[in-house]
Amino acid sequence: MGLFAHTGIAKLAPVTNGAARMRAVATGLLVLMAAIFFTARYLEPLHPGWGFVKAFAEAAMVGGLADWFAVTALFRHPLGLPIPHTAIIPRNKDRIGDTLALFLKDNFLTPSVVARRMYRVDVAAAAGRFLSNPDTSGEGRLRLGASRLFADLLDALDQERLGGMVKQAIASRLRTLDISPLFGQSLEAALREGRHIPLLDSVIGWCAETLAANEHLIREIVHERANAILRWTGLDEKVANAIISGLQKLLFDMADDPDHPLRVRAETALSNLAFDLQNDPEMQARVARWKQEIVDNPAMQRWMDGLWEEARSGLLRAARDPNAALAGKLGEAVKQLGLTLQQDERLRETINRFARRATVGATASYGDGLVRLVSDTIRGWDVDTVTGRLENAVGRDLQYIRVNGTLVGGLVGLAIHLFELWA
């Protein structure tokens, strides 16, 4: 469309093809009338009928020239002559911009006008239809376009810097989070609701399995620690069997008896730990140090890097294939949300009220800024840009005015000639 002007606005071509074609037609018609006039003037003595042709062509030239002058005077000086009250649009560019800005402000960007318009717009229902019927062609293209844009933006970002920002944000959040009371409250709730019992049972079962798998180690330890007399008499084997049997019985009793003393002691220890986590400053400081060491551990840093990469890959997959992302439970949830927005009148009214208030508030806050943007933008355009834009918009119709002026002028001239003959 041309090079950028110094204002940063792309200049348009002076006229579009349609306007240029109509300009050629109007100019050609004017030239034709001039040729007819001179021909009729030469042939008028030969026959009275040529007088009618001459009158028509003469008046048509006058009308065509007058309308050419009027049309040209809107955009530039006719023939480049600085005739007063010509080049009207270039001379009044700033005033036109200010008038257009005031027109927009008074008729479109006032809170009352926007509020009346928004009362007729059902934002919630439109959003509900979009969410519950995502397969329609227009909305599908919109969703695919938005997804593609989001994917391109995410893919274009500096991943090392962005990943570092995400990792720093997670680490900073973990450092400032006081996890001791959270752990203490969670442990206290688990004890109160009996959710610790399966954990204790699992620990006891693991201990029993470990004991069964390592009986030979206990026997070797007892055999090595026993003296020669015990080994000679075989008592070391009996001692080892007694130890193993005792431990097995202890574990079996703990598994079968919920009120076993060791289980009670374990629950008491857990209860004391829950209390200390919530109330003991020394315990809280110790947990805070452990948390800091874990956050600063290189393995934790690598885990957070992997977490970000997995999240980013998942976002890219969902953005590049929104249909697949919305095919499962997420898609059903989105559709259900859309149906709810359409069927729940109270929810729909709440959302519409929020949309109206937000739009009216944005108009009240930023309407003047938008108006100034229109005015300042037009002021920033150079004269050729403004002239070209307006001429492209109405140039074809203005050339029709020239054509009509030529023909109407000719008819008026013909009528005057007839009046002169009959008078």
Image (cartoon, helix red, strand yellow):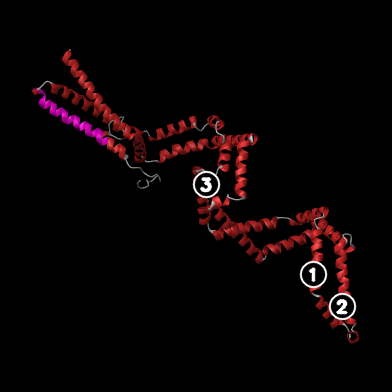
Q: How far apart in space, not on screen, are marks 2 and 1 (Cα)? A: 17 Å
Residue, disc 2: 240
User: As shown in the figure, which amino acid type bears the numbered disc 3?
Assistant: Arg
Q: Relative to residue 9, is residue 131 drawn left or right?
A: right
Q: From the image, which quarter does the C terminus lie in?
A: top left
Q: Secondary structure at mark 1?
A: helix
Residue 143, disc: 3
Magenta stretch prevailing secondary structure: helix
Question: Of label 2 and label 1, which has the lower sequence position?
Answer: 1
Q: Residue furthest left?
A: 46
Residue 209, disc: 1
Q: In this rendering, which labeled residue sits more in front, label 2 or label 3? A: 2
The structure residue drawn at horizontal position 59% and vertical position 48%, both measured from the top left corner, is 331
Verify CB contact (< 8 Å) between mark 1 and mark 3.
no
Number of other residues with Cα within 10 Å of mark 2, as a class: few under 14, some 14 to 19, many 20 or more = many
Question: Of label 1 and label 3, which has the lower sequence position?
Answer: 3
Q: Which residues are magenta?
A: 23-45
The structure residue drawn at horizontal position 16% and vertical position 27%, both measured from the top left corner, is 37
Q: Secondary structure at mark 2?
A: helix
Q: Relative to residue 162, is residue 222 drawn left or right?
A: right
User: As shown in the figure, which amino acid type bears the numbered disc 1?
Assistant: Glu
